[in-house]
Image: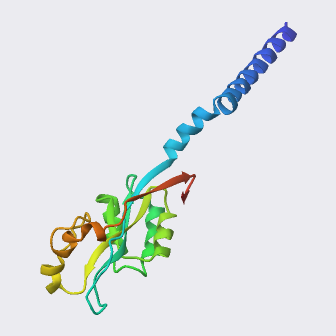
Amino acid sequence: MKEKRAKILFSLFFLGIALLFARSFQLQILNWDKYSMEVQELSTRIVKDSPKRGNIYDRNGNLLAWNQRIYNLTNLGGTLSEGTEAELYQVLKDVVDNPYTIIDKLNFQKRVNLEINSVTAQKIGSIDKNLQVEERYIRKYAHESLYHVLGYVDNEGTPRSGLELVFDEELQGQLGTKWSILLQMNQFHL
């Protein structure tokens, strides 16, 4: 009787292992293309790449309007963990006046614009997969008195008046895209 039970248990155990192996083979070999596309869709973000507007110079070659690079930090998740906040503080403490203000904005407003260098932006992007760092450009002008002639570009990059509006086609760049592929905790750009 004990031998019969042992054979039945061994058979059930062997059958279970065989079913697990068959299912694994089906998922990893037979249906690989289907599931790899699903994983790629889940781990790929397509981000619009803002174009840079052309500079405006006067007849003497003095720069009147140009682009200044800023970085958009976006919290794609919930509240930042204590570890993430501590790492952010360490990266930002020498770069901005009050890192806690930036951390609070990321927790509550989920987005903040920073004037930082590209090395700092890369460090921030590697801290947490839910922190997205995007490079953007804002328009700067040599002097406020030039607005009536040069016009201005709003925060969305739309020219509103003056030379910025008249020569928009010549000044605007072309919109591009970036594909960000998230692999584990690292982010690679194509």
Q: From this view, report whether residue 15 is shown above or below residue 178.
A: above
* Image position of 112 (left or right of 13): left
Residue at x-position 37% and y-position 79%: 96
Q: Quadrant of the C terminus?
A: bottom right
Residue at x-position 14% and y-position 86%: 145
Q: Quadrant of residue 62?
A: bottom left
* Image position of 67 (left or right of 165): right
**Place of residue 68 in the rendered image (x, y in percent of width and height, measured from the top left):** 34, 77
Report the residue that reaches farthest toward the left: 148
Q: Quadrant of residue 34?
A: top right
**Place of residue 47 in the rendered image (x, y in percent of width and height, measured from the top left):** 41, 55
Q: Nearer the viewer, residue 3 or 68?
A: 68
**Place of residue 18 in the rendered image (x, y in percent of width and height, measured from the top left):** 76, 22
Colour approach in the figure: rainbow
Q: Quadrant of the N terminus?
A: top right
Residue at x-position 19% and y-position 70%: 166
